[in-house]
Amino acid sequence: MSEEVLLMGPGPSPVSQRVLRALSRPLWGHLDPRFLAELDDASGALRLAFGSSARLTFPVSGTGSAAMEAAVVNLVWPGRRVLVLENGIFGERLLAMAQRAGGDVDRRSYPMGSPVDPEDVRRALRARAADVVAVVQAETSTGVKNDVDAIAALAREQGAQLIVDAVTSLGGMPVTMDAWQAAIVYSGSQKCLGAPPGLGPISVADTALAVRPEGTPVQSWYLDLGLIARYVGTERLYHHTAPISMVFALAEALRALREEGLEDRFLRHRKASSALRAGLVELGLASRVAPQDLLPSLTVVHPPKGLDEATLRRELLLAEGIEIAGGLGAWKGQAWRIGTMGESARLGPVLRTVGAIARVLRRGGVQVSPTAASEAATAAWESAR
Ligand SMILES: *Cc1c(COP(=O)(O)O)cnc(C)c1O
């Protein structure tokens, strides 16, 4: 049996042959000028994807959660007033980190499947000013897009530093750090960027770290952005050994991103998610997210009624070689999460997925038409803009 799996979950996403080859390149040292040139090249492409001109833009050694932690521990210290906007488990993770960092943390929570309400944020900030506002742009636990443009405007009015989680958005939809005037935006390598898990791209506004008072060092030595800046910046001072092979892989994935261009890439994600949704509707699987809140990188639907959804997913994986994900938290057993991220945001993987779900449903006794589903998906791919 083939061990190859088509990764259609919420990450990791599939990795292209050229990125896999980059992983097997012979190693260079972390101070080799050729390695540093490649790291700089990757950082340049990350600035493009982040819509950022910030000097300190680089991949954190660690997954998206490490980049999240880097953002939080560098901007939150004891007594700092933090407002976390939470509408799913990644917002909750931000909240937990801000509390651990000793912040004076307020939260505004919104029901799973709903976006953050900017009017409510305005009221919350009027009731209590914040030094830091944190929000997830693309909430991967529910497939909901938050209106970061509106939230960033409110943070700016207040003079609050803004942290944006762009883990499931970077490389799949617009991320506009400079326009937001965000303090820190971070992501992960294994979602829409199309690299393996293990790096957390981050961009830190030039003035973001200057507000920390003297005598309150960042609680994490490893994730102290001021220290890491001395390695990734011009000084090239050793901090920790860079994960060389992972940087090669990310740099290669980012070369592919540059070659494609951001606009074409975003369009491809929109077309793939439209195609997937059209196919799933034809199979009787309705979206859990309202049309205006949909993500181009992740589709979340109600699982089939009357069948055990976990059994169906296992059959999809073991008999069809396709991985999708179930729900998290309150949506456990009540959602299917299917990604169109990076390399999976193409018509081929979408059609394979729709066809395989149709077969699994038919084996479970559900009357569906694989042909109608694939025709609907193809038509949606062709008409999406
Ligand atoms: C996946 C994800 C993370 C965490 O990334 P890991 O790579 O799993 O550490 C954080 N935020 C969002 C929105 C995510 O989708």
Image (cartoon, rainbow, N blue to C red):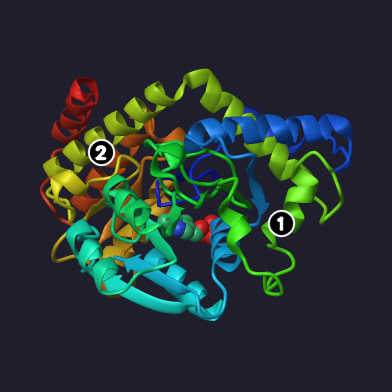
Give the labeled residue for mark 1: 226
Depicted 83 relative to depicted 63: above or below = below
- Rendered-image quadrant of the C terminus: top left
Query: How far apart, in angstroms, are the residues tagged by discs 2 and 1?
Result: 43 Å
Q: Nearer the viewer, residue 179 or 221?
A: 179
Q: Position of residue 91 (x, y in %)?
A: 38, 66
- Nearer to us of marks 2 and 1 is 1
Q: Is residue 224 visible?
A: yes
Depicted 344 relative to depicted 8: above or below = above
In the drawing, does residue 191 fall left or right of residue 269? Answer: right
Amino acid under label 2?
Leu
Q: Nearer the viewer, residue 313 or 9?
A: 9
Residue at left offset 32%, top offset 41%: 353
Q: Which class describes the residues within 10 Å of circle 1: few (<14), some (14-19), or many (20+)?
A: some
Q: Position of residue 148 (x, y in %)?
A: 32, 49
User: Residue 104's quadrant in the figure?
Assistant: bottom left
Depicted 311 relative to depicted 276: above or below = below
Check contact, mark 2 vs mark 1: CB within 8 A: no
Q: Position of residue 45 (x, y in %)?
A: 59, 30
Query: Of the residues under marks 2 and 1, which one precedes in the sequence?
Result: 1
